[in-house]
Amino acid sequence: MKINELTDSIDGKIVGNDSFFLNQDFTGRFTFINDSTKGDIVIRHWINGKGIEMAADKEIACLITQNPKDGAIEKAEELNFPLIITDKIELANAYALKWTVNNFSPSSKNIVITGTNGKSTTSHLIYHILKSAGYHAFTNTDSESEFNTLIDPMVSKLISDEINANGKLDYLVIEVSEVQGWLGNLMKNHASLMSNALNPEVGVITNIAMDHIGLVNSIDEVFDEISAVPQAIGDGITILNHDDELVRKLDAKNPFYWSMNDKSCDLYFDDGIYYNDELIIEKRDLPFTSGHFIQNILSAVGACISLNIDLDEIRNAVKSYRALNRRFAKLNDEPLIIDDFAHNPDGIRNTIRETIKLLDDDRRLHVVCAIRGSRGVEINQLNVEALVEVLTDDINLFLSSSNDVVNDLNYVTPKEREVFFDVLDKNNVKYAHFDNLIDCLSEVYGLADKNDIILLIGAQGMDPAESLLQNIL
């Protein structure tokens, strides 16, 4: 492949050396500049002149960027170094993902998972089932869902590194962010671009709800971003949540529906998981029995059935599954401390409702919520309104800005904090707020009796809670 063919494929332009054939120099690996070696291609959102010098010294095949600055173009021309500039970095990363799959893993069966909630647990469970069944599988899912975007070439790098280290893959299980952006700008059709790059045999859409406020500002915009995914799945099978009204509106060529309520679906839950009206997994064998986690299990089981994985293998793997970090994880027994990555309205409502089911006359519930920092007033208003909707008078609420544990990308702004206070005050909800997470956790733990429940919810601002508690318990 010539470098100008790569440039044309990502709507780019090239400065510096445009004369060589990539296949003479390219290792096949897309990566980051610090990780790169001779012959790699680096994709970086921005680059300056010093970065171009570093890339030239490393003898990488070429560098792709969206934002050349501080002498980058001039340095590329001076060093005769191939620099490709594109207006949309996601096109470069989608190209890298497609090239990597086609060249490193052409025979694998590929699964994409997207939706607003539950995609990480669903992806991780599908991966666990496939691994337990003896297949070589790869997933990009991690506990913080950091590797599910086209912002950088991480997924391409991880796939090529896995295959170089451990050989041919049977399955790729790829979590895809349903909405994505960079510096406040929406990456239009992000989920579709990423799904198309993978050419999936099976796709999963968990649900459609509000999150990423600012990038999208209505549920219709979320629907528009997700609605293109079934077209990317094409002739593959699309696993769909029949209980979600918007998911039912998606136009999928080969839909496979599951339900918590409707027994007319091929796969459903009724005090156990049924497929074609036969019980395949007893409720006692489920790793967790809260409603939203059963939904994740149904999505994963539906995907693996569609991949023709043996039902006994699926059952045994579900029984042995252990959840990702911060997915309704128990951190302590007395008092019971539960930690969950509930960070948007649906997640908050579902998690608190599930926790309330654990209460009895001898137990109080203390909810500790980390305000979402640097994510905007709108999502925080929706989050606090969700809190108001599910909290009762006998539940104690504690808020943290987590100034002691977050970086400047997750710092809670005054307006984000004020919208929390305003909504709670208007609804006469009592609360205590702490600037620092360590102070908040210490206060709650000191107030809780051994029979009580402490529920920790929130995104980055609550991530360090488990380690902080080690010095408190």
Image (cartoon, grey):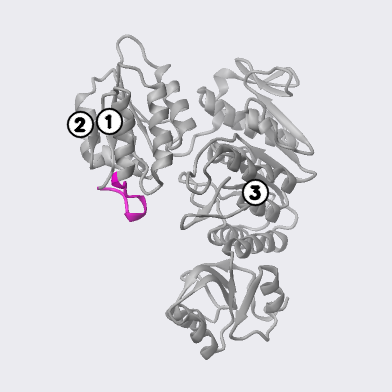
Per the image, the residue denoted by label 2 is: 443
| Dot 1 and dot 2 residues touching (CB under 8 Å) | yes
Q: Which quarter of the picture shows residue 422?
A: top left
Q: Which mark is residue 398?
A: 1
Disc 1 marks a residue whose amino acid type is: Phe
Screen quadrant of the N terminus: bottom right
Q: Position of residue 47 (x, y in %)?
A: 47, 74
Disc 3 marks a residue whose amino acid type is: His
Neighbourhood count class around disc 1 (C-alpha, 10 Å): few under 14, some 14–19, many 20 upward: many
Per the image, the residue denoted by label 3 is: 136
Disc 2 marks a residue whose amino acid type is: Glu
Neighbourhood count class around disc 2 (C-alpha, 10 Å): few under 14, some 14–19, many 20 upward: some
| Depicted 180 relative to depicted 130: above or below | below
Q: Which tag is nearer the camera, tag 1 or tag 2?
A: 1
In this view, the residue farthest toward the bottom is 78
| Residues rendered magenta in the picture | 404-414
Q: Please tell me which of labels 1 and 3 falls first in the chain.
A: 3
Q: Please tell me which of labels 2 and 3 falls first in the chain.
A: 3
Q: Measuring 56% from the left and 58% from the top, which residue is drawn there?
A: 158
| Depicted 55 relative to depicted 463: above or below | below
Q: Position of residue 463 (x, y in %)?
A: 36, 43
Neighbourhood count class around disc 3 (C-alpha, 10 Å): few under 14, some 14–19, many 20 upward: some
Q: Secondary structure at mark 2?
A: helix
User: How far apart, in angstroms, are the residues tagged by discs 1 and 3?
Assistant: 44 Å
Q: Which tag is nearer the camera, tag 2 or tag 3?
A: 2
